[in-house]
Image (cartoon, grey):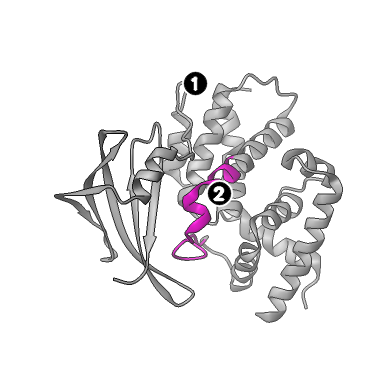
Amino acid sequence: MDYEAIVNQNLDAVYRTALSYCKNTYDAEDVVQNTFAKLLQADVAFEDDRHIRRWLIRVAVNECKNMWKSFWRKNVCSIEELCYEPEDVTPQQKELLEEVLRLPPKYRIVIHLYYYEGYHVKEIAEMLKMSESNVQIRLMRARKKLKEQIKEA
Amino acid sequence: MKSENQSKQEYCDAMDKIHAPEYLQGKVRAMNRQSKVKSFKLRKLAYVAAALGILFVSSNAVTYAATGSTWVEKAIVIINGEEQEVDVEYFDYSRDGTEYKGIELHVDEDEVTSVAVEYSGD
């Protein structure tokens, strides 16, 4: 598959994944560019479209983690918690998005990959390089934390 | 209380409305094998230099941001005896009710992204 077709099919998915981890558009854009730069430089024989999507998302998550390891991100918070507002969302959707974004990054990413991208626990474990039981625990804790947050709100 | 399926559907509907901006689409499509991967690592020496406050601010103010609370100057940082020009950005922000002032130094992107120093009070 040629590069342009891969970009057309996967750019939004990579952007949404980066946004769900980074919570702001500036970092997400850097992650997206780095991810596709690595795609161009990689020497990987992809089996199918799903393989390409999984590879891109895994690279995007790693890029997000590298960014968050830096001194700046560790020690300084964004001026606003939610630095982007999607257009045309209902108040309920906006509220739910905000609650998901309040979760710690390690919970946000499993929620996004499981519920939005539709990956199975095994696939998420491979992408995030952790055990399946760890993914299940994070999903369970993320759901519990979300319920508590929504109740408080 | 909403069911898990209802919440899932609302999250998916909200996410479906998020799209990469057009300028980003253009940038990504225009990339090639020579495109550089931006590093987020800090060079230790640059970090130490900033932490020690070895900073000489020049008189050239470059920009004043629209918010009114940030502006950028040029500065010279001495690293290992060599002068390096950097953009110095000052900004104000608050966290947990405390007012902070931050300084971010932007250096050559090929090697270092940024170093940051923050302080509170005058």
| Left or right relative to A117: residue B27 | left
Q: Amino acid type of disc 2?
A: Trp
- In the image shown, does B106 or A25 lie closer to the viewer? B106
The chain that hosts pointer 2 is A
Point out the stretch of residues depicted in magenta: A63-85
Instruction: Report x, y in % for residue B112.
Output: 40, 37
Q: Which residue is rendered at x = 62% and y = 48% of the image? A: A17
Left or right of residue A105, residue A121 in this image:
right
Indicate yes or no whether the magenta region holds residue A68. yes
What is the three-letter code of the residue carrying label 1?
Arg
Residue nearest the viewer, comparing A73 with B8 = A73
Given residues B16 and A117, the one toward you in this image is A117
Which label was assigned to residue B33?
1
Residue beneath the point at 75% across and 24% down: A47
Mark number, residue A68:
2
- Residue density around tag 2, few if under 14, some if 14–19, many if 20 or more, within 10 Å: some
Residue A1, by quadrant, is top right
